Amino acid sequence: MHNFLSSDYWNERYKKDETGWDIGYVSTPLKTYIDQLTQKDIRMLIPGGGNSYEAAYLLENGFTNITVIDIAPIVAERLKAQFKSYEDSITIICGDFFELTGNFDLIIEQTFFCAIDPVLRKAYAEKMKQLLKPGGKLVGLLFNRSFENGPPFGGDEKEYRDLFSPYFTISKMEPAYNSIPQRAGSELFLILTPL
C-alpha cells in the first residue's frame, strides 16, 4: 500500500497544515446543489471528509443524518469536537472508506477521489455503488486535468465515463459552471445513480 493512503500520511499533512486542497469553505457547486435539497433527513455520506465544510454547511441548514469518514485520527478528533453540539445529526468515523458498510441516499464527493491512488478507482466505483441505496446519488466534483505528482491525482471525462458507466447511470458529468476561481475550467460536476 502506498504511503499516501495511510492514516499516518494524512495525519502528518493535517498536523503540518499541508492542506493545499482545503479552500476554507464549502465549494460553490456543492453549495448550489445542497441549496436545492428539500428533504433534510436523507442519509448522507462525506468520504475523506477532511475539515468538512460541507458537513458544517449541511448542519447549519438543518440536515440531520450525516456521516463523515476520514482515515486521519487528527481529523476525526477535530470534527468530533467541532460538531459536538450537533452530535444527534452527525456521525464521525475514523476509518478506511473501503471497509465502510451502510446504505446512503446521497454521497458527496469533494477531493476524496483525487486523494486515493488511481489503482483504487475501480474499487472506489464498486464501493460507492455498494454504499448507495437504489435511487441514491453520488454527487460531486472531479478534477478534469492532470497533475505532475499526486495526490491530487487528476483525470478526464472519458476516463471517468469508462470507469463509472459499468456501475452507474451518469445523469450529469459536465464542466462545473460555478467553480471557485482557482479551479475554474478544471472541474467536472457529476451526478451518478447506481445501476
Image: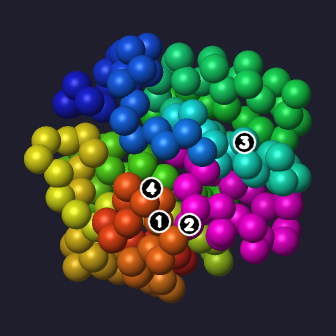
Q: What element carries label 4?
A: helix
* Residue holding disc 2: 29
Q: Position of residue 158 (x, y in %)?
A: 23, 79
- Residue 56 got which mark? 3
Above or below — where is 76 with respect to 98?
above
Answer left or right for 125 relative to 65: left
**Label 1, residues with CA under 10 Å away: few <14, some 14-19, many ≥20:** some
**Is label 4 in contact with label 2 (beta carbons under 8 Å)?**
no
* Residue holding disc 1: 179
* Colour scheme shown: rainbow
Q: What residue type is labelled 4?
A: Lys
Q: Earlier in the sequence, mark 3 or mark 4?
A: 3
Instruction: Report the span colored magenta.
Output: 26-49
Name which residue lies at 25% across and 40% down.
151
Q: Does the magenta stretch include residue 40?
A: yes
* Front-lying residue, 52 or 73: 52
Q: Which of marks 3 and 1 is nearer the N terminus?
A: 3
**Is label 3 in contact with label 4 (beta carbons under 8 Å)?**
no
Q: Where is residue 160 in the image (x, y as percent from the top left)?
A: 29, 72
Estimate the spatial distance between the alpha carbons at disc 3 and disc 1, rounded to whole Å.
19 Å
* Residue holding disc 4: 127
Q: What residue type is labelled 1?
A: Ser
Q: Can residue 156 be seen in this view?
A: yes
**Is label 1 in contact with label 2 (beta carbons under 8 Å)?**
yes
Q: Position of residue 20 (x, y in %)?
A: 37, 35
- What quarter of the picture does the N terminus occupy? top left
Q: Which of labels 3 and 1 is toward the front?
A: 1
Name which residue lies at 75% across and 74% down.
36
Q: Earlier in the sequence, mark 2 or mark 3?
A: 2
Estimate the spatial distance between the alpha carbons at disc 3 and disc 4, rounded to whole Å.
25 Å
